[in-house]
């Protein structure tokens, strides 16, 4: 009798407490660790269907459509991504064209600057080439015009 009493007052409640701890704490924490947004969204339509078939609570049709939308969220997300990718592709095409035109404009500007030879411009005060000295002195030079023959004679 003492063994029976000890077992039912001590060991059985401890075993029930350990089982409850395992289920309600340890396994629930493991379930919450594995829980994702997709799994939560998949449970929402089930909850809506349960509420719809439970006749005491009226469920509007809009809520049922939301449930259908959530049930087919994968299909809607793929369609949304395809739509976004087509817009991104269009934007990238326009950006590529603009970059090509900017590169063409820059290339033509560089070619135009090379033609003007702007890199090798001389400074304003820089000396130029030395001038050639005349091979005749001032006395030997002809004065030009009619007086040229007279000056030589």
Image (cartoon, grey):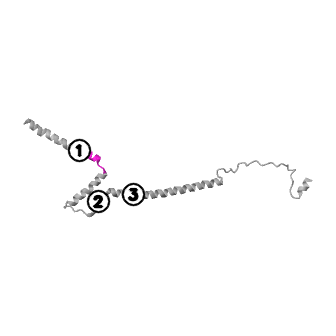
Q: Please tell me whether mark 3 sits on a helix, a strand or a loop.
A: helix
Q: Are marks 3 and 2 in contact (CB under 8 Å)?
A: no
Q: Which residue is mark 2?
A: 68
Q: Which residues are magenta?
A: 22-36
Q: Which residue is mark 1?
A: 25
Q: Residue at x 30, y 59 (%)?
A: 69
Identify the disc placed on residue 89.
Answer: none
Q: Please tell me whether mark 2 sits on a helix, a strand or a loop.
A: helix
- Between 22 and 83, the residue placed more toward the observer is 83
Q: Is residue 33 magenta?
A: yes
Packing grade of label 1 (10 A; few <14, some 14-19, many >=20) is few
The answer to whether 59 appears left or right of 116 in the picture is: left
Packing grade of label 2 (10 A; few <14, some 14-19, many >=20) is some
- Along the polypeptide, which appears first: circle 1 or circle 2? 1
Q: What's the distance in space between the residues labelled 1 and 2, CA to CA?
A: 33 Å
Q: Which residue is mark 3?
A: 82
Please, what is the dominant secondary structure of the magenta stretch?
helix
Q: Residue at x 37, y 58 (%)?
A: 80
């Amino acid at each position: 009798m003492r063994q029976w009493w000890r077992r039912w007052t001590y060991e059985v409640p401890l075993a029930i407490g350990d089982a409850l701890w395992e289920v309600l704490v340890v396994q629930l924490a493991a379930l919450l660790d594995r829980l994702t947004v997709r799994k939560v969204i998949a449970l929402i339509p089930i909850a809506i269907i349960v509420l719809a078939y439970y006749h005491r609570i009226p469920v509007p049709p809009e809520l049922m459509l939301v449930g259908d939308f959530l049930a087919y969220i994968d299909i809607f997300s793929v369609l949304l991504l395809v739509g976004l990718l087509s817009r991104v592709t269009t934007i990238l095409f326009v950006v590529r064209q603009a970059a090509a035109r900017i590169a063409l404009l820059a290339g033509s500007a560089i070619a135009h600057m090379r033609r003007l030879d702007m890199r090798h411009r001389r400074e304003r005060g820089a000396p130029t080439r030395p001038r050639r000295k005349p091979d005749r002195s001032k006395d030997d030079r002809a004065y030009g015009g009619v007086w040229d023959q007279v000056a030589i004679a």
